[in-house]
Amino acid sequence: MRTSLDCVPCILRQALEAARRVSSDPLLHELFLREVLQWASEMDLDGPPPVLAQRIHGRLRELSGVEDPYRSEKDAQNRMALKLLPELKAKVESSRDPLGSAVRLAIAGNVIDLGVHGQIDEADLRRALRTALEEPLLGDLEVLRREAEKAQRILYLADNAGEIVLDYLLIEQLGPSRVTVGVRGAPVLNDATHADARNAGLDVMARVIDNGSDIPGTVLEDCSSAFRNAMDEADLILAKGQGNFETLSQESRNLFFLFKAKCRVIADHAQVPLGAHVVARPRACAFVAREVPPGRNP
Amino acid sequence: MRTSLDCVPCILRQALEAARRVSSDPLLHELFLREVLQWASEMDLDGPPPVLAQRIHGRLRELSGVEDPYRSEKDAQNRMALKLLPELKAKVESSRDPLGSAVRLAIAGNVIDLGVHGQIDEADLRRALRTALEEPLLGDLEVLRREAEKAQRILYLADNAGEIVLDYLLIEQLGPSRVTVGVRGAPVLNDATHADARNAGLDVMARVIDNGSDIPGTVLEDCSSAFRNAMDEADLILAKGQGNFETLSQESRNLFFLFKAKCRVIADHAQVPLGAHVVARPRACAFVAREVPPGRNP
């Protein structure tokens, strides 16, 4: 999707927050914000927002000399989600619809997003998980179920640390032997990399590959050829989070986006209400939201 | 006060909202946003935020050819407040502390601010008025009361349309014969001009002057000499709203700021909680918030 003009003030706010995270020097914050303002004044709005985010976070890593500024937050987010994993696993397994419940919980994990929100604590996450199980799920869960039944090779594109722990539940339901998990190729924001897949225990359960890119989304031209091959070989792709939706929504592959619509621009693009939990297909403009009643879940 | 880095994303959001208000052409919105990004990348942060707002709104009037883009909103805001005026006047007059109640209601009127909020409707305004009468008022109301008792010439700097109707109640309590009301010299945002003072009935009650400037605040170097004389001659100045606080907080005059702290940057500068109703003095850093219990009011 194109970058909306409404994304620009939001990107600037995120850039300032990120600068304060890597440095306590107000002069660096100011110089960096001026640099981002200059870039934004000339940016190509035809590209999706994560492309500017890549530039912003790359420059911050360069300025600060810190290779992975969000490492400690990502570790904390993984620990927080791992603590809840046993009870969530039991909930999924005792559910009348384990796949549906796992989809809902995987989408709930998408609240752990330092780009949109600030810090998320355990109470926030528990609230998000409860909401995801209780509220209607918009989109094509039944189509996803049918496609998942017949798929041979499933590529599962992860989004954030912490969230990736909840993806474990869904990957388990899909059948890990036919799943490849895709993570970012290098640290950017709190997006999940190989280290997070390992922390979530995914590496001993499924094949994990990285996409070779440090964009907080999936821009194929920026990805490795190995990753592009995995995209081509998959007969079903599940893509988590807003960043993957922003960068892949024009694709014509057999793709399902699983995310929570956390901002107005994304909600409008997916034609769902703000805050909705969504299973969307590509060409979101043609996407007709159908409610899956929560009665299907425990 | 200096412009905080946190003001920059907020100013950009306001600029985009303003562009959409004056034109329905997405190309104009984009070109304008790029222009503001360019300005912001080079802006002097030593100045207060209203100086950039002046430039933004001046340029939009130029681009759109519309001299007063907020005229219809301002008229609606004045009508909305005028509708409530008789009951509020009765409330003030029957209060145990008419001056205190009028101060509280004048501060409540400060929610009518298109720079910070979007549209405010009658229900929002009624809620704000109720809150202002019930919640603690932070600051120097008792000092203001003493200064008002002995003042010969009071200059009352108005802020927004709609809000200026509620200022009527306070000016009535201060004694209109010694009050001069200052309004902006030209339209900018929904700030009050001569037209709004007339709509509020202030011109038949007190002397009204404009400051000769289209900054949504009071930057003396940008004001007319007649207005600067009025500032010098006043032995007490009441300045409404965040814009006046942002631009006059370094002054050493006998000045009281009356406003609602609607954003984090202003609240921090005034050392009060976000959302507080404040009677602040200049050099806000030394300002010690003292609560005036609501029991003093009806």
Image (tube, coloured by chain):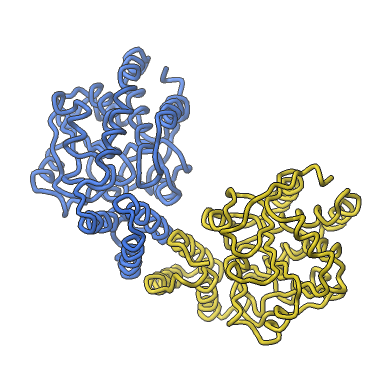
Chain colours: A yellow, B blue
- Percent position (x, y) of residue B209? 13, 37
Q: Nearer the viewer, residue A171 or B208?
A: A171
Q: Is residue A186 left or right of residue B36?
A: right
Which of the pair B36/A223 is nearer the observer? A223
View extreme (bottom): residue: A225
Residue A69 visible (yes or no)? no
Res. A177 image quadrant = bottom right
Query: Where, by quadrant of the figure, is residue A156 drawn?
Result: bottom right
Q: Residue at x 78, y 72 (%)?
A: A154
Q: Position of residue A18 (x, y in %)?
A: 54, 67
Residue at figure coordinates x 30%, y 33% from the top left: B76
Which quadrant of the structure image shows residue B31?
Answer: bottom left
Please name whichever residue, A192 or A246, is drawn nearer the observer in this view of the structure: A246
Q: Between B229 and B263, which is closer to the camera in this rendering?
A: B263
Q: Is residue A295 above or below residue A210?
A: above
Which residue is located at x 69 percent, y 67 percent? A255
Look at the image and tell me in which quarter the C terminus of chain A lies: top right
Q: Position of residue A93 (x, y in %)?
A: 90, 54
Considering every residue shown, the one lying at the far left of the view is B226
User: Does residue A119 appear to the left or right of B26 in the view shown?
Assistant: right
Q: Position of residue A57 (x, y in %)?
A: 54, 74
